[in-house]
Every structure is written in structure tokens, then in C-alpha cells.
Amino acid sequence: MSILIENCCKTFRSVPVLKNVSLQIDDHEIVVLMGPSGCGKTTLIRCLCDLETPDSGRIMIHGKTLFDQQKTQDKALLKQIHQEVGLVFQNYQLFPHRTVLQNLCDAVLYQRLLSRDEAHKKALALLSQLQLLEKADVYPSELSGGQKQRVAIARACMLKPRILCFDEPTSALDQASIQQLFPILQRLRESMAVLIITHDQEFGKQIATRTILMKEINAVS
Ligand SMILES: Nc1ncnc2c1ncn2[C@@H]1O[C@H](COP(=O)(O)OP(=O)(O)OP(=O)(O)O)[C@@H](O)[C@H]1O
Ligand SMILES: [Mg+2]
């Protein structure tokens, strides 16, 4: 099992947003999570990625405890977990003053996970897979929306995540770029689990191996 979320609760300013959310995701699944605006989808993904801390509950990533009534205090474990959960942000969050290649390599070099040569080799291989090799030395401002998204996907894959989360991956894309996303997601699925938040029902239906409505998993017990 890739992800286990059990009875997660999160309240903002005394408004409960996550109410005993439980969800399991296995390797090789593409889980599409849908639900109305404000129901807590992004909050749930942010909890998985440790960008937000739940108030209570349990989150396990590949058998490693991120949160069990409190966040793990084990810094080495936390570092491993951070590598195993990737997030492709809705606005991609590429560093504008860094080239595509630098965007891919900065984090692994900063964390000393790979040598410079290894990082470049890996980044170029990922860029090649995503048809972006010729963009390695350009800056994000010179890329189309679909290209920026593929750079963000490549960057998230540098750390070899076991699960990759996408927050509304199609919202800024035209139909042609959405079509390009399908084979990429299918390929990612071969080596990890994928969790996608989307309002795009057609896209969700086509890509999901399982569709979940937030109201099905977000109930007060
Ligand atoms: N950091 C925060 N501080 C206070 N309230 C927050 C915070 N983050 C989220 N919320 C609130 O939590 C609720 C759920 O927000 P969330 O972003 O998870 O919704 P969502 O389901 O992703 O919605 P959308 O489909 O519009 O993106 C909203 O009411 C939002 O205002
Ligand atoms: Mg959201």
C-alpha cells in the first residue's frame, strides 16, 4: 500500500474542513478526487505532502509514519517521506530565475542526494522522456503552459516519488496539452501511485483507475 490516511481532521479558524477523512491508495492506482470548491481537496493533498499538519488522525506513506496524532519527530524519516511524496502545484511554482535544467537539479543537489553529473544525467533523461530536451537551458518564462507543467512533473520525478499528487492539472491547459498529459500519467503510474484533484469530469473519467468524491470520505463519524 502506498498511502494510508485514517480519520484525519483539520480545522481552520474553528471551521472543520477535514472531518475524519480516511483513504487508502495502492501503488499503480490513478485516484481522481473530486468535489465542490472549498470541500478540502487541496487541504488533504497539502497534509499528505507535509505542507499542512492535521489536527488528529494518521498518515502513513509506504509504511512510514508521517503523522500519528502528531507529526513524526524523526528528522531522517521525515526527509525520506518528503522524497516519496511529490506534488505538482496548480501554478507549477518553477523558479523563474533558474533554467529548466537548474529547476530540475537544484533540490537534489541542495540535499546532496546526487552528484552534479548524476543529477544532470537524470534530469536530461526525464526531459527527453517528456519531449523537453531542447528546453533544458531556457527559463520558465519562455515555456508554454503545457511545457511548464511537464517541467514541474520532471522536477517532481527527480526525487523518485512513490506517489505524485496533482492539484487541478488541466485547469490551465488547452485540449492538446491535456491530451499530452494522458500518456505521461499512464507512464508515471507504472512506478508509483498518482493522486489527482480535478473539476474536469471528462478528464477525470478518462484517466482514473478509481474516482472518489470528497463527500464519500469526508464524513463526521
Ligand atoms: N491556510 C488556511 N487558512 C484558513 N483557511 C483555509 C486555509 N487553507 C484552506 N482554508 C479553508 O479550508 C477550506 C477548504 O479549502 P481547500 O483549498 O482545501 O478547498 P478545495 O476543495 O481545494 O477547493 P477548490 O476546488 O476551490 O480548490 C476553504 O474554506 C478554505 O477557505
Ligand atoms: Mg483546491
Image (tube, rainbow, N blue to C red):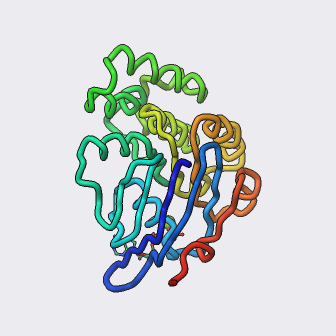
Relative to 58, is 18 above or below?
below
Q: Residue at x 55, y 63 (%)?
A: 23
Asked which quadrant contains residue 158, the reply is top left
Q: Give the farthest residue toward the top.
A: 117
Q: Is residue 72 left or right of residue 125?
A: left
Q: Is residue 186 left or right of residue 129?
A: right
Task: Give coordinates of residue 72: x percent, y percent.
Answer: 28, 55
Q: Residue at x 44, y 35 (%)?
A: 155
Task: Give coordinates of residue 6: x percent, y percent.
Answer: 48, 66
Q: Is residue 37 left or right of residue 104?
A: right
Q: Residue at x 52, y 76 (%)?
A: 39
Task: Give coordinates of residue 123: x percent, y percent.
Answer: 45, 24
The one nearer the camera, 150 or 186, is: 186
Relative to 69, is 95 above or below?
above
On the question of residue 172 being in view, the answer is: no
Figure disc tally: 0
Task: Give coordinates of residue 102: x percent, y percent.
Answer: 36, 28
Asked which quadrant contains residue 51, the reply is bottom left
Relative to 87, is 55 above or below?
below
Relative to 183, is 65 above or below?
below
On the question of residue 178 being in view, the answer is: yes
Q: Residue at x 40, y 19 (%)?
A: 120
The one nearer the camera, 63 or 142, is: 63
